[in-house]
Amino acid sequence: MDQGTERDVPPGRGTGSGAVRGGPVTGRVPLAVVVVDREGSVSHWSRGARRLFALPKEEAIGRPAPDLLPVSGVLPETGDIGDHGSWTPHDGLGPDLESSLGGRLSYPAAGRARLTVPGDDRVDVLWWAYPLVGPGPERLLFLAADAEALGRDHAGGDPDEEAGAATVERIAPGFALHTDFPGADELARRLPEILPSMSVGESARIVAQVLELGYPVLEFSQNDRVPVTPDWGVAPRAERRARRERAARALAAGEPVPDDLRDEAEDLEYAAVRERLEFLNEVSGRIGTSLDLSRTIVEVSKAVVPRFTDVAGTYLREQIVAGEGFPDGVPDTTTMWHRVALEHTDEPGRWDDVVPVGEAMPFPAHTPFFQCMTSGEPVLVPRITEEMGHAIASQFEKRDIRPLITGRSMLLVPLKARNVVLGFMILLRHPERPVFNDMDRVTGAELAARAGLVLDNARMYTYQENVAETLQDSMLPHIPECMAGCDIATRYLPGTLLGRVGGDWFDAVKLPGARTALVVGDVMGHGLNSAAMMGQLRTAVQTMAGLDLPPAQLLRNLDDLAQRLGDSYLATCLYAVYDPVAGELHLANAGHIPPVLVRAADGSSELIDLPTGAPIGVGGVPFEAVCVPVAPGDRLVMCTDGLVEVRGEDIGIGLATLCESAAHPAASMDDACDTIIRALGTRGGRKDDVALLMARLAGIDDDAVAAWRLARDPAEVGRARAAVREQLHDWGLPHLADTAELLVSEVVTNAVRHARARPVELRLVRADTLLCEVDDDDHDLPALRGAGPDDETGRGLRVVSALAREWGASRGRTGKTVWFELTLPRRHR
């Protein structure tokens, strides 16, 4: 606004300020402000709109905008109003305003028109329509001012006064920050976006000068220029359109624009730039809605068809599609490019057989594709000639793609991120559509830059997810479904928001005496550090379980180890040992949630009452173990707190739901686990990892166990062989007798030779395998040794190792146990 005489203008029509006769005019008047939403209905109706259109806000809000704005452009007649022309009466929507209200114009429009106001004469108005781009519901900002009153006031108040008494060349709408429009604050900050040719400083100056008014204003001066503003004396509409068309033809042909068409050319160039910016903004909003690579690829392809192009083919490096890394440097003729998406407006199926999605191929050095991917710059081909079409088609074996591409305009844009070409897009336009030009090249480059960054984020996320999943899978054990006297099923669910790596784990360890150790633990925290700590603790538990330490002693040792590893992490752990022969569970707890025991007899379920204990890593806290009798068919359910704990909810509710869902009848162990996950896994938007282990405690029948006590006499070795042979015949396993006799002979001989005072005990257990155990009171574990040709000893354990399915030795409180297993026929398992 020019600095000059001003005065505040109260709301209403026919107000102005500071006119200087015969010179330029400066001043401001109120505006009517109407906001139209994306449904075409009025969402805001200002006080100025109520005065100008004589309609209360209550009757305007929610009504279709075209019903309330019956205005149109009109032709000038003779006579004048302040030397600014006069207008014939004409009601009804004008084309530009109708297009703006209908959402068909994506650039600002403006005009001058008359409207009929109930109870008043026809009113001459100036109007502006500004499309609004953004996430909100508003689509169009419509501004209007009383042109007749404005002209009269600034011509000195009398329309018949001397022509040229006042001159107004340009007018510009502005905003006060505290208007009653709810979005006025944001719109005031976005003035440079709404009026792009206005600088930030200029818009700030306008806002500051109208701040005290408290309502939208119209600013007019001799010098201010905005991209879209109606001339005070508007040329006839048909003439104006013809001038625009001439300017458009000159711009399209790259010819100099005549001086008399410069204004129209500037408006057209501005509109084109605005449209491209809106397009890029829209594309940016549509792509990258997730970090899923496949979904992102589809979003990028669909975002440009059909608005920018008619065909869009997307190619990525083959390693990216496979979730792998790729070598540094510029691609070459050996680089394989995977066609990951193809969108088009042609008839369905036309492209599918010729260029199917999923195909991988290299591109020769003489092609524009190779130029694009090696230079990292867009390549523009205004029209694909027959010669070029033939050259491109030669890359496709036994397929003629020339009918699909010849005569079309082609733009190749690289998909880059961090100066690395990840892929490229092939964009084609139909022959009847305008060819790609330099502005399209710039637009395509910007589009590809944004798409490339989104694709790279998705690629890196997918790669990291694969790495994390591989790491997590490597840390979690692969537990057999059947172990001695029990069936086991497990589930692991990563945290939904914190990646696939966490500190939750489960395990099952084979123990001497056909027993099984069942473990569930949870390192507090998430991420790689927690996972690393989990791996250390899990390995330690496996090692100590193999030593057959009692549950409470194992947790004490684990706590000592955690203290030595550092005090940065705490962990909870539940350790249980199942003895299928005795029908007992021995459990100890270190700060973990209690397990659930489902009784087979009546289907009831209960939380096992055992001392909670302190988490691993606290240090100096004793642990206690309890023994719980169990029956064949009972089920033990152990899980981490991520399954039952929900923020803001008492954990007792989750534990109660766990008991209820665990008791639900199921056809299989897997079905039982799924029932629990369905009942608990989706409550309250779970964010923590979940480890779940369920064991069906089948037990081992008494008639499947045979035991003998042997004296410390070498003659007992023969009795042991005979007893084993006879028992195997009774069990219907005579084909195992020879091997079992030989191995029992070797193991019992060692036990008798090294036993000190207590008799040697021999036991056979028929479970999922044939287990043989020999106990003595010597604590020294046997080891494989090399035996020379003349040595008489040292070969026994080598025989056991060669013939047994598995074998091992472990220390106990009173000595050691040496055991081996033989595979049972399927019908005996």
Image (cartoon, rainbow, N blue to C red):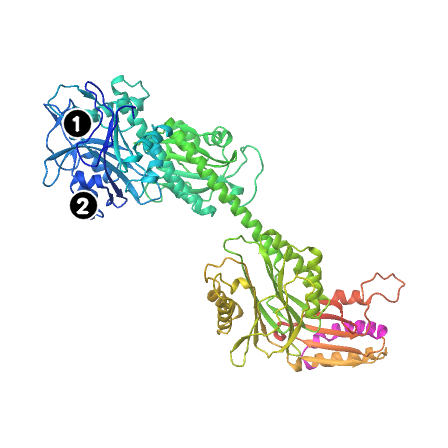
Q: Which residues are magenta?
A: 730-755
Q: Which residue is mark 2?
A: 56
- In the rendered image, residue 516 lying in the magenta stretch gets the answer no
Q: Nearer the viewer, mark 2 or mark 1?
A: 1
Question: Which image quarter holds the N terminus?
Answer: top left
Question: Which image quarter holds the C terminus?
Answer: bottom right
Q: Is residue 91 above or below residue 234?
A: below
Q: Which residue is mark 1?
A: 153
Left or right: residue 794 versus residue 46 is: right
Nearer to the camera, 521 or 611: 611
Q: Is residue 291 above or below residue 385?
A: below
Q: Most prominent secondary structure in the magenta stretch?
A: helix
Residue 757 visible in this rendered orientation of the protein: yes
Residue placed furthest toward the right = 790
The type of residue carrying mark 2 is Pro
Q: Residue 677: percent from the left, percent from the top?
A: 49, 65
Q: Residue 242: percent from the left, percent from the top?
A: 21, 24
Q: Quadrant of residue 252?
A: top left
